[in-house]
Image (cartoon, helix red, strand yellow):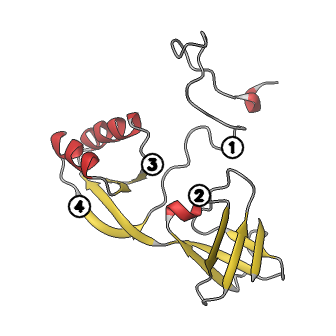
Amino acid sequence: MLVIEKFAAPGTLPDDALVLTYEYRCKNRLRTKLESGEEVGLFMPRGTILRHGQLLSANDGRTVLVKAAPEAVMEVRSEDSLALMHVAYHLGNRHVALQIQKGCLRFLCDHVLEEMVRGLGLEVLKTLAPFEPESGAYAGLGGHSHGHSADGEGKGARIHDMRRFLP
C-alpha cells in the first residue's frame, strides 16, 4: 500500500490524484484509493485539512494531486448581496462550513438549514458539486477553539490564540 505523510513542493507535476469529499479531506488518518484505483494510506499531521489542488508526496516519491469530489450540497444564489450576507451571517452563527462565491453560498445538505434559508426569503438548490468551504479567520494562527472566555464561565469576550500577531 502506498503511504502519504507530507505535502509535495508546489509546481510538481502529479502522477495520480486523490479524490475525496470534504469530510474525508478533514481526516488525518485514512485508508482509501487513488483515482487510478491503487490503495493508499494517508497519515497527515493532526489538524490538516486537505484542499483541492494541493499536492502530496508519497513515500515512493510520486506526487498526488488532491481533488474535491462532487457531493450533495445546497446552493443559495442571489444577485442581492445583502440577502446573501444575511444568510451567511445566520449560517456562520451556526458554525456551518460555508463555501462563498460571487452571488452564491454553498453548504452541505441539511433540511433544517434549507428551511432556515427559505424562511429568510431565498431559494435553495440541491446539487452535486465539489465542496471547498472557507478555512476560517483563525486558520494558521496556531489554533482556535470556542468556549474560552475572559471570566472562565463562558461569558464575556472570547480569548483566541493570536500568538502570531504578538511581537
**Disc 3 and disc 1: Cα gap in Å?**
17 Å
- Label 1 amino acid? Gly
Q: Tag 3's secondary structure?
A: loop
Q: Return the disc, 3 or 2, that comes first in the chain's sequence.
A: 2
Which sits in the foreground, 42 or 16? Answer: 42
Q: Residue at x 26, y 46 (%)?
A: 112
Q: Residue at x 23, y 42 (%)?
A: 116
Q: Return the disc, 1 or 2, that comes first in the chain's sequence.
A: 2
- Label 2 amino acid? Cys
**Disc 4 and disc 1: Cα gap in Å?**
32 Å
**Disc 2 and disc 4: Cα gap in Å?**
25 Å
Mark whose residue sits in front, 3 or 1: 3
Q: Tag 4's secondary structure?
A: strand
Image vertical order of residue 147 relative to residue 83, above or below: above
Q: Tag 2's secondary structure?
A: loop
According to the image, label 4 marks what residue? 125
Image vertical order of residue 117 relative to residue 67, above or below: above
The percent position of residue 81, horizontal first and vertical second, equals: 29, 43
Q: Return the disc, 2 or 4, that comes first in the chain's sequence.
A: 2
Q: Return the disc, 3 or 4, that comes first in the chain's sequence.
A: 3
Q: Residue at x 59, y 58 (%)?
A: 26
Q: Which mark is residue 97?
A: 3
Tag 3 near tag 4, CB within 8 Å: no
According to the image, label 2 marks what residue? 26
- Label 3 amino acid? Ala
According to the image, label 1 marks what residue? 140
Quadrant position of the C terminus in the picture: top right
Q: Return the disc, 3 or 1, that comes first in the chain's sequence.
A: 3
Q: Tag 1's secondary structure?
A: loop
